[in-house]
């Protein structure tokens, strides 16, 4: 019976950094397919606002306030979540930032911040969540990668280094945890209409270059990541390990 292959009923999902953009859409998509969703953020106001947005579209989401770079906050929040909601079945490591500057002048603080928030966080949050997954011998981890897990662009060196790292960390996690019936995979978004790319959307030169460069001829919409997320969160992907699904309108297929 393969009819309910994508059903997430009874599953508990944690999506980090899900107050807006890609994380928000993925959380909504997992909920639409039956999962109970918990979102995290480090900003209490944004977290409250996001919970309100979910409520208005008829979704009961749980909120946990923690900074994905802070191991103590992570520890407390994951313990609370497991106590309140139960075992975490699905973890989406989504929280991320970008800071664009020429590499020869890239400020060291920004460099460390981008690497910490985008890469080290995946190690830190996963390490805590996977304990319960190992105990229960099942789990799904989805790491949000990027086009920049594969290719670079001017001014994005720290982000590119971090996202390349997230791709390889995805493989390392899959290699170590597949034996516990945990599947770890990544989603690599191309250019999406989100806060993170706000400046680029407004930049006419960039916008026309991107539309020309993308075989699909347009920006992606965050809800277009839901299909890949549901697939990687569900039993439909039970033998898929360490893969990155690029959702990019064909950019990486062309030069
Ligand atoms: C940039 C963008 C990218 C996107 C995205 C691409 O400056 O080129 O910000 O880094 O955010 O990750 O996949």
Image (tube, rainbow, N blue to C red):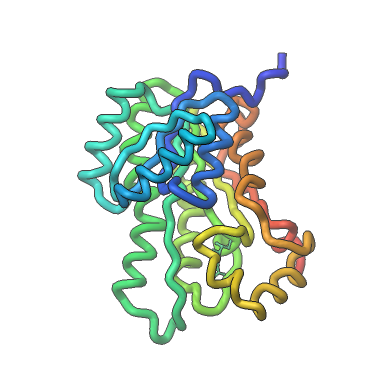
Quarter of the picture holding the C terminus: bottom right
Residue 151 as seen in the image, left or right of residue 77: right
In-image side of 14 versus 191 (left or right): left
Nearest the camera: 66 or 91? Answer: 66
Query: Visible in this render: residue 179?
Result: no
- Residue 155's x, y, as percent? 50, 78
Q: Position of residue 236 (x, y in %)?
A: 64, 28
Rendered view: 45 above or below 152: above
Quarter of the image with the N terminus is top right
Asked if residue 44 is positioned above or below residue 254 in the image, the reply reads above
- Give left or right: position of 73 versus 43: left
Residue found farthest to the top: 1
| Residue 235, percent from left and from top | 60, 25
Q: How many marks?
A: 0
Quarter-wise, where is residue 66 in the image?
top left
Image point (39%, 45%), residue name: 49
Q: Residue at x 35, y 55 (%)?
A: 120
Can residue 108 be seen here? The reply is: yes
Q: Is residue 222 left or right of residue 10?
A: right
Q: Ligand 1 is located in which of the four quadrants? A: bottom right
Q: Quadrant of residue 209 in the image?
A: bottom right
Relative to 186, does residue 213 appear above or below in the rendering? below
- Residue at x 42% of width, y 86% of height: 104
* Nearer to me, 139 or 65: 65
Who's the residue at 38% across and 63% down the image? 115
Which residue lies most toward the bottom here?
104
């Amino acid at each position: 019976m393969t009819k309910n292959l994508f059903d997430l009923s009874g599953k508990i999902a944690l999506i980090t950094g899900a107050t807006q953009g890609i994380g928000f859409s993925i959380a909504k998509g997992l909920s639409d397919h039956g999962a109970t969703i918990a979102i995290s953020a480090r900003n209490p106001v944004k977290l409250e606002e996001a919970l309100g947005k979910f409520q208005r579209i008829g979704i009961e989401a749980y909120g946990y306030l923690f900074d994905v770079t802070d191991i103590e906050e992570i520890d407390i929040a994951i313990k609370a979540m497991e106590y309140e909601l139960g075992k975490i079945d699905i973890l989406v490591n989504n929280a991320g930032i970008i800071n664009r500057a020429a590499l020869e002048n890239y400020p060291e603080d920004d460099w460390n911040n981008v690497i910490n928030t985008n890469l080290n966080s995946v190690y830190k949050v996963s390490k805590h969540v996977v304990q319960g997954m190992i105990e229960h011998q099942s789990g799904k981890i989805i790491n949000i990668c990027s086009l920049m897990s594969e290719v670079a662009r001017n001014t994005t060196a720290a982000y590119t280094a971090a996202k390349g790292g997230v791709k390889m960390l995805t493989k390392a996690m899959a290699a170590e945890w597949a034996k516990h019936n945990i599947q770890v995979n990544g989603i690599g978004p191309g250019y999406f209409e989100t806060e993170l790319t706000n400046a680029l959307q407004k930049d006419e030169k960039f916008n026309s270059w991107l539309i020309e460069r993308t075989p699909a001829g347009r920006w992606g919409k965050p809800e277009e990541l839901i299909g890949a997320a549901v697939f990687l969160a569900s039993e439909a992907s039970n033998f898929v390990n360490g893969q990155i699904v690029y959702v990019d309108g064909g950019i990486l297929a062309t030069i």
